[in-house]
Image (spheres, coloured by chain):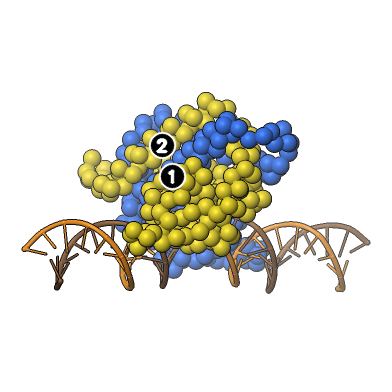
Chain colours: A yellow, B blue, C brown, D orange
Amino acid sequence: MTASPTAADADWLRLDRQICFSLHAASRAFNGVYRVILKDLGLTYPQYLVMLVLWEQGDLPVKKLGEHLRLDSGTLSPLVKRLEGAGLVRRERSTEDERSVRVRLTEEGAALRERALEVPRCIARATGFDLTEITELRERLDRLTTALDAAALTAGHEED
Amino acid sequence: MTASPTAADADWLRLDRQICFSLHAASRAFNGVYRVILKDLGLTYPQYLVMLVLWEQGDLPVKKLGEHLRLDSGTLSPLVKRLEGAGLVRRERSTEDERSVRVRLTEEGAALRERALEVPRCIARATGFDLTEITELRERLDRLTTALDAAALTAGHEED
DNA sequence: CACAATTAAGTTGTGCACAACTAAATGGAC
DNA sequence: GTCCATTTAGTTGTGCACAACTTAATTGTG
């Protein structure tokens, strides 16, 4: 079980504060920059992610959208509804499977892609990172996500 | 201004999807692991961050807490109120400056630190990263955050 | 065919992040 | 001392994330 707490434990607590805080802060900082840049397009950051998938993959059922973005219907349903309200997508109940709802880009939604092409340049400039660094960081973050997802399943409760 | 869109732009759009998605996903994966581990302590991840600061720094006014965590009163006020509801902290209006509210650990809140000492070990194990990798990642994320914060101020609107 | 299990989407409730705002206290400038 | 700008918390409203639940359609099995 737990060894008696020591100064080393306190150091780990501090390190934990640093790493979890760093990731949390970086995520919010990213969000903030996207917020500024995307305001012109009338999109939030998560809405932009959905649009990126649709621009790349074409129209998809909500389920597939969720698989690409690791988001469930609880998040996507209202988000897609807001995109529909903005006139960027339409939701169409599938005819061959009435459970499924296909999210389809409107002309306006498809056209928005042209204006979005500028976004990555703005972001890349904002990070101050070169292509190598971005790629490395992405690789490391993905590895982290994979490990964390696996750990979340086993609940992190096993003994040492 | 914008050069006519090309296949290269589309590639950037895909890369953008990758990097912003990676960070977003990593952040949520981290959050998920913390959620599981912190459930025993009755804390959410942001509440844990607040407690970490209080354990390390002692009691602080809300303002200082916000500076450490880059959070404003709109986020902290209700969060601290929930911590107070859980009996972990007390909020005390400062006597020398009636505007300021000092957040003070209760005995119960201070005692919770003992149980929290185990959290970093669980997290470290969940990431599968060694100390060097964690430190490197943290350093890179902090650099990213600094750059992004600076960019958010200049609004990312300047020309190339 | 009938019926139980599964699946897709949506709904509800809680908590966080942040913008925009309000209220109260403080500190200067005069 | 009076008045105004600043500072500290808090409130309100919007949107996202996620757990737990509901509804409706589909699939599988007897």
Q: Mark 2 points at which residue?
A: A142
B24 is higher (above) or lower (below) than B35:
above
Q: Is residue A4 left or right of residue B159?
A: left
Q: Which amino acid does label 1 sit on?
A: Ala
Q: Position of residue B106 (x, y in %)?
A: 44, 62
Whether residue B113 is visible here, answered yes or no, is no
- Local packing at callout 2 (Cα closer than 10 Å; few below 14, some 14-19, many 20+) is some
As drawn, B152 above or below B134:
below
Does residue A33 appear to the left or right of A147 in the view shown?
Answer: right
Q: Marks 2 and 1: CB-CB under 8 Å?
A: yes
Q: Seen from this angle, which residue lies furthest top?
A: A132
Residue drawn 33% across the image and 51% down it: B37
Q: Measuring from the top left, give residue A78's x and y in whole percent.
A: 48, 62
Q: Is residue A122 above or below residue A107?
A: above
- Would residue B98 be found to the left or right of residue A59 on screen? right
Secondary structure at numbered mark 2: helix
The quadrant in which residue A129 appears is top right
Q: Is residue A90 left or right of residue A70?
A: right
Q: Can residue B39 be seen in this view?
A: yes
x, y percentage for residue B109?
A: 41, 59
Residue drawn 62% across the image and 54% down it: A42
Quadrant into which the C terminus of chain B falls: top right
Q: What residue type is labelled 2?
A: Asp
Label 2, label 1: how far apart the Cα atoms are = 8 Å
Residue tagged 1: B25
Q: Which of C23 and A61 is in front in this view?
A: A61
Closer-to-camera residue (B72/B97): B72
Asked if marks 2 and 1 fall on the same chain, the answer is no
